[in-house]
Amino acid sequence: MRRYSAFAIAREAARHHQGWERAWRSPEPKKKYDIIIVGAGGHGLATAYYLGKNHGLTNIAVLEKGWLGGGNTGRNTTIIRSNYLQDPSAAIYEKARSLYETLSQDLNYNIMFSPRGVMMLAQTQHEIRGYQRTAYANALQGVATEFIGPQRVKELCPIIEIGGPRYPVLGALWQPRGGTARHDAVAWGYARACSDMGIDIIQQCEVTAIRSQGDKVQGVTTTKGSIDCDKLGIVVAGNSGVLADMAGFRLPLESVARQALVSEPIKPCMDVVVMANTVHGYMSQSDKGEMVIGGGTDGHNNYTQRGSFHHIEETVRALIETFPMISRLKMLRQWGGIVDVTGDRSPILSKTPLEGCFINGGWGTGGFKAIPGSGWAMAELMAKGASPLAAAFGLERFREGRFIDESVAAGVAH
Amino acid sequence: MLILTCPCCGVTGEETEFHAGGQAHLQRSGPGASDEAFEAYLFARENPRGVHFERWRHANGCGKWFHAARCTLTLEVFGTYSAQTTQPPQEVLDAIAKRRPGWTEGGK
Amino acid sequence: MSTRLATGGRFLDRNQPRVFTFNGTDLSGFAGDTLASALLANGRSMVGRSFKYHRPRGIVASGAEEPNALVNLGQGAAFEPNQRATTTEIFAGLKAESQNHWPSLEFDIGALNNLVSRFLPAGFYYKTFIHPRAAWKHVFEPIIRHSAGLGRAPKERDADRYEHFYHFTDVLVIGGGVAGLQAARAAAADGGRVLLIEQSAQWGGRAPVDGGQIDGKDPEVWINDALEELEKAPNVTIRRRTMGSGVYDHGYVLGYERIADHTPGDTRPRHRLWRIRAARVITATGAIERPLSFAGNDIPGVMLASAMRDYVVNYAVSPGDRTVVVTNNDDAYRTAIALKNAGLDVPVILDARPQAEGDLPRAARDLGIRIETGRAIARVKGRKSVTGVAICAQAGEGAVLEEIACDAVAMSGGWSPVVHLWSHCGGKLIWDEAGAFFRPDPDRAPISHDGQPFVATAGAASGQMTLAETLKDADSAGKVASRALGLAAGRKGAPKASQPQEGPITPVWMMPQGAGPALRQKMWLDYQNDVKVSDVQLAAREGYESVEHTKRYTTLGMATDQGKLSNINGLAVLSGALQNDIPAVGTTTFRPPYTPISMGAIAGEARGDIFQPIRRTPIHDWHDDNGAEWEPVGQWRRPYTYRRAGESTHDAVMREVKNTRQHLGLLDASTLGKIIVKGPDAGRFLDMIYTNMMSTLKPGRCRYGLMCSENGFLIDDGVVARIDDDTFLCHTTTGGAERIHGHMEEWLQTEWWDWKVYTANITEQLAQIAVVGPNARKILEALGGMDVSADALPFMAWADGQIGGFDARIYRISFSGELSYEVAVPASQGRALWDRLIETGQEFGVMPYGTEALHIMRAEKGFIMIGDETDGTVIPQDLGLNWAISKKKDDYLGKRAQARSHMTDPDRWKLVGLETTDGSVLPDGAYARGSGTNENGQKTVIGRVTSTYYSPTLDKGIAMGLVLNGPDRMGEVINFPALDGSATPARIVSPVFYDPEGEKQNV
């Protein structure tokens, strides 16, 4: 792999950029791999990358039915944070966040991680208590957060109206090392690094069946033929249930549409990421200048990657209360992503009833921020059979009642 | 923004009048059920790409729960019917069969 | 240079001049002008700077597809960035500024990017700025961010109003050109309700500019006749300035009406969002002309050929004295003819096709215009404006054959149907080889709730590019829609139209076809985002082969015009680079809105005070008048405390607790949920809903109950009163009434539908006041009426009767540990009762108390609070509430769940009291530290604080918490680390701090 650098660009500029090589190879599938990962989104590619980098396993194929990074990796609002309440969540999201810090250097691909800080607004007494509790938990988990007052909120984000008539801003949980990254670049950077290690990324290759012998996985049937493997990882947000069905088990999750939108680009006016959970909206400003806004989830099962407009209305209405200036911006584009939501709204990183078959999914709306940590843990789970980061996210928790519930900080009002 | 018809009060309304309630026709497991059966009752879901039998409540209307058969890929609604039943009525199954020849319950 | 022509201009009212300001200079236009036409009329062809290289940008189009002419519009509370000049109608006093430059439009420091543009190809930022690590956040990103963005951020609160509008119709026709008009006529012929909307201020679309005849009439005459007919029809609604913004599932369509953008300050709402529900949608959205890709095609003065004749015909604007026309089709000849007819010079028409023999080329030749076939533009000369073109052979590599001086270039690469609205909800496209465009595939239309197609296209939007075909198609679309609704379609045939015969188009995706890398770096595809032919080819070379990869890698089509001009050209270049067919490469997904719509319109009326409703108890105003500090609880507001002059909030709370414990306190408890459960099976039903046995409760008695979810977790609690054999009244938490009522109904309707039970949420029918403290009985006795003695109304009993003349139900229950009565009266009597209690209570030391005093008193007694001790992960067994879980029942909601291994784990954290060793107040939410770390390196925790208060009764901090093996560790001291590294030690004690024997309430 030729390294990317300013010098490389200067050299190429002299010959009209005719000499750049492919970022990733486009191989035909082999008959057999040690490991097949289904799904070339961020999580699948990161899993393959860390299998290679941390465990020396590179006889791997990553199969993608469409184009790599084309699912939720390329459809989210790019927020990265790890200010979670429960220990297992804080562990994997903080692992992810810390890996994001150096990911551009690790991959030699600028994924534009921007640790500009994430604040979650407290707009009820209940949220104040929940976020104070989170700050105490985070301190013991090794996640740097603090609870800040309204004046500090205003200093960090001057466009916030802290004295709104309905939900004044009472404070915020502040994670200064949270931020954003360029979502597509994460998938592309991992893909390039995987390809360089000899891992085959095979696009336009849809898995149509999972083959097993007895209780053990044997391989997959795809639109590009049959491929054998010793181990199989299913990493297909939005389609987890379909693949699980092929493997012969059911999952505790449902697929719903999540809405997001961006405004037209404007000059920089917001240097932090703000989440307002009371009114269900969050916003940041991209490097292009667009205000990136995320909001509600449809209640009904949906695979259409589009959603209902009333969620957009609710989100925009709520954000105008907190950010009055956006009233005179314009919505440029709205879209939906299909998210897999589990019974406790926390992800699944687990062995499955089919030996050799592992699943990583159910990230709901929180997947992008987890990508490096999720890949790290999934790789360890697949290589060694167990991973401390993944331990609490096993499927058996639903049978045992051992849930990981992150809605706690915003629980029931008295 | 879906349109649904409440079979209880007969109103055809916007999605915002209704509240989605997940998979229909779940068989309750109570005390005495095995761990596996209880887990399946609470959490295992069909989540099909295609025909889905699901619960809705006419929350901003008559308040009644009802069932709908709907396609999660095209969002078309094959029919709505009473919540007080353990299986879809024949006319709804017929409507599905008409639109999805070859479809069988369970989606297989 | 562009200028105003002496005569003409279909849209202009020359009797109404309009003075406006651009970049601080006063300019003049006429009513009917757009900002773009007025700027051109004033010789302002350069109007902005591009996103990445800050290159000079001129007006290139005449409508919604314009990528370049975006301005900061207005001032102060009426300021708005990124307004498209081509769709902004001018008005007197309009103030506009160009964007994305510093210090000025003419001299822009950012244009340095242009000088080094060869070092900034597509995706350059992915390949550099990697080292050193901190530099991205602190150096490179700020530079990129400040260089990017377009308009300024608004600063002030929006002064305008917005509104939402509902509309239900049989047929919605989007687009008011001749296709839309005819489709609406056909659809309305048999009485169906029709809504016709047009995004611009003018009806008729392109036909009056492009010429031809309809039913033997001039198109403009036909349009006026059709409009008159539609306006008269009682079943037809028509609206100008209303754009079809997005098509959503089941016939839901958003219309975006710009009511007052052109008449600011006239008190009307600025925008109106139409929420349209249509049984059938016809999109008659026309087509958009494509640019041609030649070097320098982005220099101000290069314009779409169709836009240029729009400016000439509609606005009497001359784009320049000498215009070179470059084309691959016959349509552009109309522009040459229009220019010539306006008295302007067309030195040459460069036609990339080998021959041009249609009616239009012949007409141009007859006017004496020089036509060069097989020719192309090698490059455009000029920097901030066009000064000439160099001509080459289209077949070659760009060797210059001739140079021609000119000050404008009109280009046409053919037309693409506007398929956005068709595609929003899943309509599929097919590639039309003859027309070289994607058009809707009528066999794969968007599907509605009934499984039927609900969107059809009409006219050019279907790919019908001649006037006759357009009208025929539109007529048919209208009739099909009408028939689909069960109406007989009208019998009238489509209007007959005639037009010059056009020769076939030859697709040209690069000009000249053999251009080398140097030229390709100067061929713009996306003008706003600065994406060039070379960028798309680079993306393909590097393996970003999917059209979505290319789009995202190069940012092609992601600007504010969403690729209306660039998508197909970019796609064609990509397929060329991949040596693949265009349809095989496919398109990107079209997302709403069609053009950007204001956030204000999306939000509508519900802002400020009416953003969300506030629920008020009957006593709300009294609280407000008496110093209540409000706390939002759900949609309710409850008094947190009543602060008196000179008092701190803390002081007020302390006073309220002390007074209640010593004398008498009043609490407005009206917000507590009250649900009637009635019927022969009511007892059986409540036995399932509550963990306790409720069926054994005697009429006249109360019982505290717990409710769990089927998943085992505690979801609500409250006192249940049995009214009679068939009737129970269930109290819920303040936030819980609707939720719990819904929970009960869900189980009744979907699981136990054969049980004979009704429920009713009567929360708002009653006002309820807690009368609390040692003097509680005295004040009620002073009011007179019911016997409230210990014998007549013992603890956990209730009675109906009259008290002080009020019809009341009194519950002898206590959440404070004091002697306490909760008096419920009809809501209409609530305020009167409260006033009477305040008045009568003066001699007994009455004071109202708020939620914080309520919390402290319940914590002193060790009573749990839903939402404090519970958070959705807590089961009753964790809270020592086993006494409230019936052992006799076979089943209740949550029982099976509570038998799972993790629920019965002896190591679950359990409720205890906590007392700091120094009497201080434990921090809220703090965790207790265990020893060591877990396998993820996190410090081990063994408990947490769930409630913590300063108790004025005990004069020290008290807390409750959940602690590992807590009840077995009484007296042990555990440590709660603060965030600063210090730790607060606290002793594990009983959670009941005050009156453990319950003597105070049992008097």
Image (cartoon, helix red, strand yellow):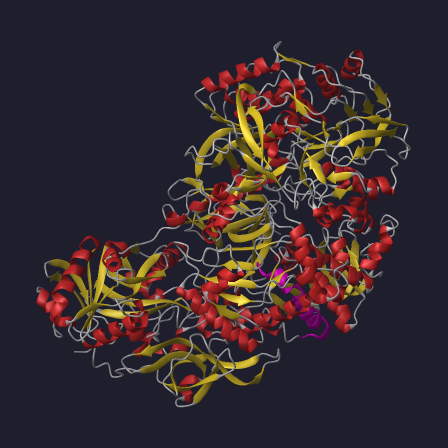
Give me the residue at 67% from left, 14% from top.
C212
Q: How many marks?
A: 0
- Against A26, is C104 above or below? above
Q: Nearer the viewer, residue C108 or A278?
A: C108
Residue C512 falls in which quadrant of the image? top right
Looking at the magenta stretch, what is its main secondary structure? helix
| Residue found at the very far bottom of the displayed protein | C971
Q: Quadrant of residue C357?
A: top right
Q: Is residue B88 left or right of residue C403?
A: left
Measured as percent of width and height from the top left, residue A53 is found at 77, 70
Which image quadrant: the N terminus of chain A? bottom right
Foreground pick, C405 / C419: C405
Q: Which residues are magenta?
A: A362-386
Specify whether residue C848 is painted magenta: no
Q: Can you name the residue that lies furthest to the top here?
A: C216
Up the image or down, C993 lies above or below C309; here it is below
- Based on the displayed image, in which of its 4 quarters is residue C202 positioned? top right
> Would residue C725 be visible to someone looking at this image?
no
User: Is A302 positioned to the left or the right of C398 in the image?
Assistant: left
Q: Position of residue C289 (x, y in %)?
A: 70, 29
